Amino acid sequence: MLDSIQKGLMIGVFSSIPVGPIAILCIQRTLHRGRYHGWFTGMGAALSDLAYASLAAFSMSFIINFIHQNQFYIEIIGALIILVFGFFIFKSNPMKQLSTVNEKKETYFKDFITSFMLTSTNPLMIFLFIGLFARFDFIQADSTLLKTIFGLLSVFAGAAIWWFTLTFCVNIFRKKFNVRGLWILNKIAGAIIIGIALIGIFYSLTKDMYV
């Protein structure tokens, strides 16, 4: 049981470390709104990771076949959602948001849900978990249901630890950003997310040309 928990924690951390739209969004929200807004953003991603890890653990063959059959449409829809999200961040005005902070306060729940929904548009994450499961020998022939459940919960815990660490470190530099710095950050974060989305769409549309 302890071995499964340790492996789950490592898988949770390794699955969250890659810098992508969620990491950028988490950093942007931490600097713009505060540490806990960033952390709840990360927790939404962690819950989505738990869902995909569970699918990978309990129904690998069915999920893999479904993704293979619908991979093009899944990739395009996910990239379009990320593109819209990046455009929203790019166009956001930190001065306007700060001036209305008392009138309209963003909630942790909203940060959590938007992050969860955004992360859920990338079902190809399941292949990352399959690879990590194989690398760490996570699913074994003698694995019991209870052992697997504790392992999966440890994946969630590992992801939560990573997002807590990231937002804690980013929050240290938060006070060094003025309104102009936040405006520049929004532009950079939004542009990066838009770029990731456009690259994803381009790759999905042209990958058959290189096969």
Image: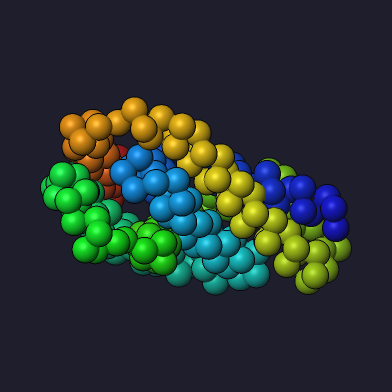
Residue 20 in sight from this viewpoint? no
Residue 63 in sight from this viewpoint? yes
Residue 78 placed where, x, y %? 31, 59
Residue 56 placed where, x, y %? 59, 63
Residue drawn at (55%, 45%) of the image: 164
Viewer-side residue, 16 vs 129: 16
The quadrant the N terminus occupies is bottom right
Residue drawn at (53%, 62%) of the image: 47
The quadrant the C terminus occupies is top left
Image-quadrant location for residue 62: bottom right
Image-quadrant location for residue 153: bottom right
Taking 192 as reference, is 143 above or below it?
A: below
Viewer-side residue, 155 vs 197: 155
Q: How is the image coloured?
A: rainbow
Viewer-side residue, 40 vs 5: 40
- The mark tally for this picture is 0
Taking 140 as reference, is 199 above or below it?
A: above
